[in-house]
Every structure is written in C-alpha cells, then in structure tokens.
Image: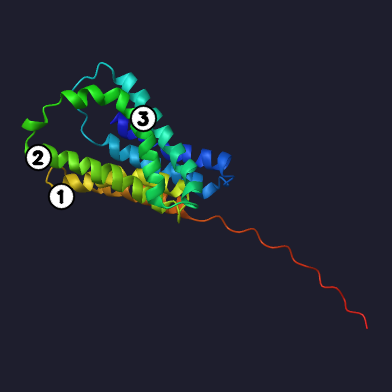
Amino acid sequence: MSASLLQTIAPIVVVIASAILLSEKITLPRVLGIAVGAFGAGLLILSRNAQAAIYPHATLGNIFILLNATVFGLYLVLVQPLMRKYHAFTVLARIFLVGVFIAVPFGWREALTADYAHFPLYIWLEIGYMVVFLTILAYLLNNWALKYASPALLGVYIYLQPVLAVLIAVSLGKDHLTWGKAGQAVLIFLGVWLVSRKPKAAPEPEVPLVAVQD
C-alpha cells in the first residue's frame, strides 16, 4: 500500500521538473488534475485490504520507492528532448546500455549462481513477461508517447495503475467492484483529463489600424 501511494509523487515531480527544465507553465487545471488524481488513487489504494505481514525494513523500502518515483519523474522530463531528435529504439537502447553498467555490479553473483536447469516452465514464462512487456515494451511505449504528449500527461497516467489493478482483480474473481471504487476511478480519470488539457494560447495583440492618407 505504501509503495502504491508513494508512486503518486512521480506526476508532481514531472510538473515541477517540466517547469524548471522545459519552461512549461504550471497551470491551475494541471495542478488540480494532479491533486484530484492523487486523491482518487489514494482512496482506491487505501480501500484495499492491508496485508498482515510485518516488514522490519519498511522505512528503508519506502525511501527507495520514493527515490524511484522521483527518478522516473525526472526521466520523463529529461528524455523528451531526445525523443524529438532520435528514434524511440535508439533512445531505449542507450538507456538500457547505461543500465547494464549500473545493475550488473549488484546482481552478477546471483545471476551466475542461479540453477537455471531446474527452473520450471512457468518461471521462464514469467521472466520473459517481465523482460519483454514490463521492461522493453513499457519503456518503448513511454518513449514513443513523449513525441506526441507532454511529460506531465504521461506522469499522471501512473494514477491509472490502481484502477487497472482493481479491474484485473475483479476479472479474476479476487475482488468486487463497488460504487466507492467506481467513484474513485472517476476521480482518477478526471485528474488525467485536467492534466491533458492544453493551456490556452495567449491572445495576439491587436494591431491598430493606421489611417491611409491620400
């Protein structure tokens, strides 16, 4: 629950970073959209049944999740100028190349000691799903979308994750759709709509007519 709530800080980081780095205006509808979406997402997340397990390092985990949400928000802002210049595959390949040098030193020992020969088929399918869909395809679609949408709009779509989680749980018979959850989903969609509204262009100054003299 804490992880889902902390992830909602990413759109706020996107709006602030866009204003500083990309000189985007922080409009009132955009601020209201983030606030409404965060409120709806928070209500939806808090309405879930809390897990009974006790996590001894919950504070450290929450700090890492908060840092992850902040870095992801900055990523959406920093990568947009690159997407206007390079292809989405090119940007994704460079990002993953940098990620290799960061991740390998922390996980190479576990990768070498794993007993791959005894992995059941469902484990390989889950690994393939995480690599292809949750990593490559997710970031590729994010990069492609940044060519046509603002970072703030992409960031606010994070609020849709709790809605999708509830819908999937309902479809699998693990949850029930109530009027309360439907209202919370409406708040999230309203927040997305407010953030997606483009600021009105400033009216052009009227040019005074000059009398033509013969």
Label 2: which residue? 122
Q: Secondary structure at mark 2?
A: helix
Picture mark count:
3
Residue that numbered label 3 is attached to:
101
* Residue depicted at x 6% and y 36%: 120
Near-viewer residue (98 or 150): 98
At x 28%, y 17%, the residue is 57
Tell me the residue that label 1 is attached to.
Answer: 171
CA neighbours of label 1 inside 10 A, class few (<14), some (14 to 19), many (20+): few
The percent coordinates of residue 76 (x first, y second) are 44, 42
Determine which quarter of the picture holds residue 209. bottom right
Helix, strand or loop for disc 3: helix
**Amino acid type for the residue under numbered disc 2:** Tyr
Counting residues from the N terminus, which is met first, the one under dot 2 or under dot 3? 3
In the image, is residue 163 above or below residue 45? below
| Residue at 32% across, 38% down | 43
Residue 180 shows up from this direction? no
In the displayed structure, would residue 4 be above or below residue 176?
above
| Amino acid type shown at disc 1 | Ser
Q: Earlier in the sequence, mark 1 or mark 2?
A: 2
Q: Amino acid at mark 3?
A: Phe
- Compare residues 152 and 84 and report the one nearer the observer: 84
Between 80 and 153, the one nearer to me in the picture: 80
The residues tagged by marks 1 and 2 sit, at their Cα atoms, a distance apart of: 21 Å
